[in-house]
Amino acid sequence: MNYLRATFLKKAYGERLLFDQLDFTIDEGDKIALIAKNGSGKTNLLNILAGTDTSDGQGKVIINKDIQWGYLPQQPIFDEEDTVWEALFNSNNDVVKAIAAYEQALIFNEANELNPDLNQLQLAMEAMDMAQAWDFESKVKQILTRLKVNFYNKQIKDLSGGQKKRVALAGLLINQPDLLILDEPTNHLDIDMIEWLEQYLSQSNISLLLVTHDRYFLDATCTSIVELNEGKLFHYKGDYAYFIEKKQQREAQFAAETDKAANLYRKELEWMRRQPKARGTKQKARIQSFYETKEIAHRKTDQSVVQLDMKMNRLGGKVVELHQIHHQFGEQQVITDFSYVFKPGERIGIVGQNGSGKSTFLNVLTGKLTPTSGTVIHGETLKIGYYSQDGMVLKEDKRVVEVVKDIAEVVELSKGEVITASQLCKRFLFDDKTQYTYVNKLSGGEKRRLFLLTVLIQNPNFLILDEPTNDLDIDTLNVLEEFLEQYKGCLLVVTHDRYFMDKLAEHLFVFDGKGNIRDFNGNYQDYLNEVQEIKDQEKNLKSAKPNDTKTFTNEATVAKKKLSFKEAKELETLSSEIAALEQEKAELNKKLNSGSASHDELLKWSQRVEEIQDLLEEKELRWLELDERN
């Protein structure tokens, strides 16, 4: 079944033509990744397909009226006065309406007591029965839990950019779309969320068209790739590695055909200059063929890539020393007793969920924030370059080249070569025309590339990259990775892009969200393997028979560091307690769904389900904490 069909799409801004005469289709079951360089029109194309922009000329987009579909733009659009709850469940879908009413009936009031309107609860349960929504209700809870959307009463205007993105994504998934169009869906998600989302999208029947810089996410969710290049679309059936291979073959074939046409053109040009009289049919055909050959011989392809060849200031023996750092906001402990001495040439990745203290740590490290206690010592030769996720400050009313000249008129490269600010802009793919474009006219990716330029132009010897992959195209990321692999200074990377982290980080700082920072000796894949082992062990503990629990736990205790006697006994009993609570919860949900209970019983059971959920979260977190130390 055809879900979407677009024909003769065109978009231009003044003299700049992004694409023309584009035809594009999405069929049921398609999972397509759209790849293109920054500024080539990816977001424009998605906006036209989703109806938030229009095609120039005669272009049309037709979406099958029998399907549900949704669009996640880079910057989601909401009614700022809405609450999160209103934004999530603003839907005409009967199933979603029933779930919203049921969840609303179960919401606790400020006194932490269940809403006493039992008639409302009974009506909501009857609506759930009518809509056959019970199975999907559990999926809705999973979506909201996994994306950590639990601030229902907040107004949209009070949310951060990342929170808005997660609310928008959750709202789309709740509506059970047949087709999703997603523009950088992994931005602002932590790694756990990304892994859950890729599993959700890859295993569901949802058809996809997405733009992403995350190569692992691309391979996990998509089965084909469409490249927008020079205003044309090129289709590839396969993963990212297959795309790279076939793209190189296509470009080699393109170059060979162009060279062959150029040789033929030179020969035919001599014949044309003799001014043949096109009286015969053969002469007319040869003249027509000449012009066709000329067009092929003069065609060009954009082979430009960012050139990173920046000089690094000399780095002495002392880099940065952190001694017994503590930091807290009110009662919340963000960093607890952390000490570390950075060594020249270190390459460290930072891992932790959103809100676990990563940004606070970077601000303490760079001196932007004074710790509650402890000492930060910077070496005399230290020159920090901080590419911040949220701290990109570019003067929107200035032209690109003016932004660079405000920092330096000339720049010295690694081998002593001196170039002008304009020449440096060209190395970052800002041509003569774009250099005199105002910053507010640049695409999101072009702004990020300019921000990277302003950081590297200062020749840092300690480079901090906070989510550097957001909005950068894959070609630029490949060049950045190559540059960083040769970089001689210290490197500290915060990123949700697992491919980028795997390639660059040699060991990790792992933030647990409780103020503790663990120095993990291994790369990111090693860390993932350890986390998976813990999850597998937790699963085995939950499924183990009561008589087997003690044996299993004792074996685990022997294999790792010993806990105290009291903690070891606690770990032994937690799995059976968790299993018992899970069973009780399942039985109560079955009773709640039966529809044959009195109001008092419904109230009692609902309260107990909430109590069990809180207990489960508490005990599972405690089990993970003990097992990690075990």
Image (spheres, rainbow, N blue to C red):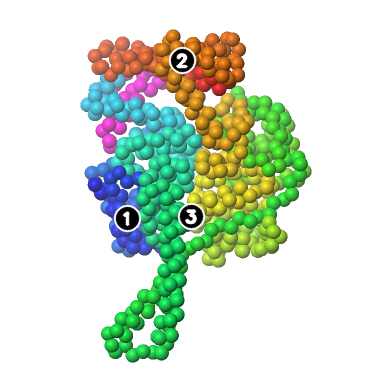
Image point 56% across, 27% down: which residue?
A: 512
Which residue was labeled with disc 2? 575
Report crowding for label 1: few under 14, some 14 to 19, many 20 or more residues within 10 A (C-alpha): some
Q: Amino acid at mark 3?
A: Asn
Indicate the position of residue 33 as horizontal and vertical percent values: 40, 48
> Would you place residue 611 above or below residue 506 in this image?
above
Q: Nearer the viewer, residue 161 or 385?
A: 385
Which label's residue is closer to the chain start, 3 or 1?
1
Q: Nearer the viewer, residue 592 or 599?
A: 592
Which residue was labeled with disc 3? 38
Image point 48% across, 37% down: which residue?
A: 189
What secondary structure is marked by label 3?
A: loop
Residue 264 drawn in magenta: no
Question: Where residue 24 is drawn, which disc sits there?
Answer: 1
* Part of the protein shown in magenta: 91-120
Say if residue 521 shows up in the picture. yes
Image point 45% across, 53% down: which residue?
A: 244
Question: CA gap, disc 2 to disc 1?
Answer: 53 Å
Say if residue 607 shows up in the picture. no
Question: CA gap, disc 3 to disc 1?
Answer: 20 Å
